[in-house]
Amino acid sequence: MIRSEVIVVGAGPAGMNAALHAANSECEVLLIDNGNRLGGQYWRHMPKERDSLNYSLHYDFAKAVKLRDAVLNHDKITVKSQAQIWSATANDKGVVLHALAPRNLGDLPTEIVFETQHLILATGAYDRALPFPGWNIPGVMTPGAAQSLLKGHGVVAGKKMVIAGTGPFLLPVASSLVEQGVEVVGLFEAHSPKRWVRHLSVLLSNLGKLFEGFHYAWILNRHAVRMKFGYAVVEAHASDAGILTAVTVARIRPDFTILVGSEKRIECDAAAIGWGFTPDTSLAGALGLPQKVDVDGAVVVSVDERQVALANSEMSVHAAGEVTGVGGSVLSLHEGALAGLSCALLRGKITEKQYRDSTKNIYAARLHAEKFARVLKDVYVVPDGWRNWVTPSTLICRCEEVSCGQVDAAVDELGARNSRDVKLFSRVGMGMCQGRVCGRNIAGYLGTDDADRIRNARRPIIAPITLGELAQDPLL
Amino acid sequence: MSEKVITCTLNGVILTAISGQSIAAAMISSGERINRTTRIDGSFRGIFCGIGACFDCLVVVDGVSNQRACITEVRNGMTIQTQRGAGP
């Protein structure tokens, strides 16, 4: 059992900044992450010897290096990478986390148990994928997958690629791929840029973001890649060997229904398609933290203005970053800083006055970043019109291979009324990903309420564990 | 510092990768897109989320099935097999 004054889970922008702020206020911090290197998904990078590529693949890698090195060199911070937490429990006295360290050539992974009175959750988010016929064909992936292959491993996902979906994330993905020699044969944003018109003042008060957008546009323009607006990939096609050969794109209306007759086929060997992000609330659910449904329909951890999700006189759980609502790296950094300082305050390492003095500017900056995040959620909203892209044979649950037709049958013939009923009748969401990919889509497909979405996002076991691994648990 | 080359096998065939790369990245760069066939209809699956969330890229590593290729690092001498259904 490893005890630490403060434990931070997740080493992305929010988690690293939380660890740094708590440690700078003299807290002993343990930073746990399941990746190989600090940075999370946003600042995923390759080992130091490939730093020249790291710098060219990131817009703001210098910022990442500065924060990473500050964390790594801090004598109050211990980093535990490659630890996959599979179980977490909270009680009145604190939090216990069970993690598995990686398997070594056939050996069982080693289990490590961590304990703390003050936990900061910064578990981030993953891409949201929407179902369409052929989305299970090898070669179809999320933009995050294409990014992680490139930024984390220096590998391009294909030679001829289509990038599609919605949101600003499509721009860095497409730009970094063209710069690495990929032929981007199509870049399709589902929404019209006109949606920005009523938010121009917010856009102009975020010139840094605007400049970053121009930076990507300049790269894409240099490679003669033109973004087309109001289109979506609505079907993927496989070769006889079962791998991707083409996608069909179609014009879609603002509600995401297809304009029939607008379909056209584009040959490609990989397609990266994403619809924003889904916060990873697995740990939050296991710990019983309060959760709510955000304006974008995502289940998020509910926190107060100090990023506290749960607290009593003995313990606290804070949450920061995408897990409290998708908002990007800048917002995550501010939230992380506030969570770290709040922990220091609760530990008595700083006074209430010191907390107020050091957080005043961060509160203002967080508010500013939150405004921008709300605008992004409005501009790049994902309406339920995608439900008319699917056919009865289209899979909605990839793990258990459950089709939309089977979900329809669970509703129409067996009387299912919510996500749980459909799960019990059709096995939807019962596979290894535990509904991480399909859960939000099932709720959207059924049109269920917030309570159903929150209930359906719960997964008490955070990562699969074998009975052999479980038998080694020191607490059993 | 130079990049270290790793040698392992994929379905019995030599696969080379750069130290630190994931199995999924090594497979993609060798041109292999199929990681497994599914349990129910036997269809092909490859890398999908790329960050360990979706469990679609499962492969058999050193005889142990259901390993996520996207978050498992290649090691020298590792034997990797594409997974058929639930296991090896």
Image: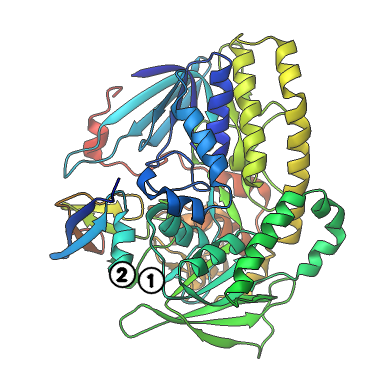
Indicate whether A22 appears above or below A168.
above
Dot 1: within a 10 Å radius of its alpha carbon, few (fewer than 14), some, or many (20 or more) residues?
A: many
Q: Quadrant of residue A355?
A: top right
Q: Quadrant of residue A166?
A: bottom right
Could one spot residue A115 in this view of the protein?
yes
The chain ID associated with circle 2 is: B
Answer left or right for B9 relative to A305: left
> Which residue shows up at 29% across the image and 30% down it?
A111
Badges 1 and 2: C-beta atoms under 8 Å apart? yes
Residue A138's disc is 1
> Which residue shows up at 55% across the image and 43% down it?
A62
B27 or A476: which is nearer to us? B27
**Place of residue A323 in the rendered image (x, y in percent of width and height, measured from the top left):** 59, 41
The residue identified by callout 2 is: B34
Indicate whether A281 appears above or below A2.
below
Dot 2: within a 10 Å radius of its alpha carbon, few (fewer than 14), some, or many (20 or more) residues?
A: many
> Which residue shows up at 75% across the image and 18% down it?
A356
**Place of residue A198 in the rendered image (x, y in percent of width and height, measured from the top left):** 87, 60
- How many marks on residues? 2
Q: Where does the C terminus of chain A fall, quadrant-wise? A: top left
> Which residue shows up at 38% across the image and 71% down it?
A138
**Place of residue A362 in the rendered image (x, y in percent of width and height, measured from the top left):** 73, 30
User: Is circle 1 on the same chain as circle 2?
Assistant: no
A135 or A458: which is nearer to us? A135
**Place of residue A170 in the rendered image (x, y in percent of width and height, measured from the top left):** 59, 63
